[in-house]
Amino acid sequence: MRFDTVHEYNFYPGRTHLHYCDQHETFMIVNHQDSTNRLMIEGITKDEIDELRLELNKAHLEDTTNVTNQKASA
């Protein structure tokens, strides 16, 4: 049998910071509110972080292009 596990975490908006530690291959999500909440995920490589960054950049560029095209055609 195989089991999939899902964990959901909710952070307060606007106070969340993302960090990556190359040395430990650890992705960290830190939220500062009344107290500090921290989620650390080990085993994520720099290449995987770069893939995420490129994916986010591509989505941002597509959104920016769509907005620019909409303004130009208006």
Image (cartoon, grey):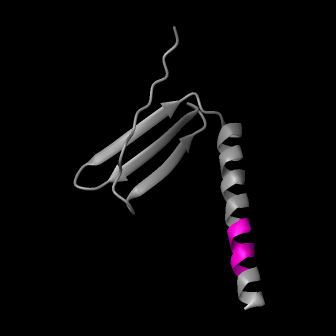
Q: Residue furthest bottom?
A: 74
| Image quadrant where residue 5 sits | top left
| Residue 62 lies in the magenta-colored region | yes
| Residue 26 lies in the magenta-colored region | no
Residue in the image at 55% along x and 43% along y: 20
Q: Residue furthest left?
A: 34
The x, y position of residue 45, in whole percent, is 65, 33
Instruction: Name above or below for residue 19 compared with residue 25.
Output: below
Q: Residue furthest top?
A: 1
Residue in the image at 72% along x and 83% along y: 70
Identify which residue, 65 or 13, lies in the foreground: 65
The x, y position of residue 29, in whole percent, is 45, 45
Instruction: Name above or below for residue 24 compared with residue 37.
Output: above
Residue in the image at 52% along x and 12% along y: 2
The x, y position of residue 69, in whole percent, is 76, 81
Identify which residue, 17 or 9, lies in the foreground: 9
The x, y position of residue 7, in whole percent, is 40, 33
Question: In the rendered picture of this protein, how many numbered marks are placed on residues?
Answer: 0
Residue in the image at 77% along x and 89% along y: 72
| Image quadrant where residue 37 sits | top left
Q: Main secondary structure of the magenta part?
A: helix
Quarter of the C terminus within the rendering: bottom right
Query: What residue span does the magenta drawing correspond to?
Result: 61-68
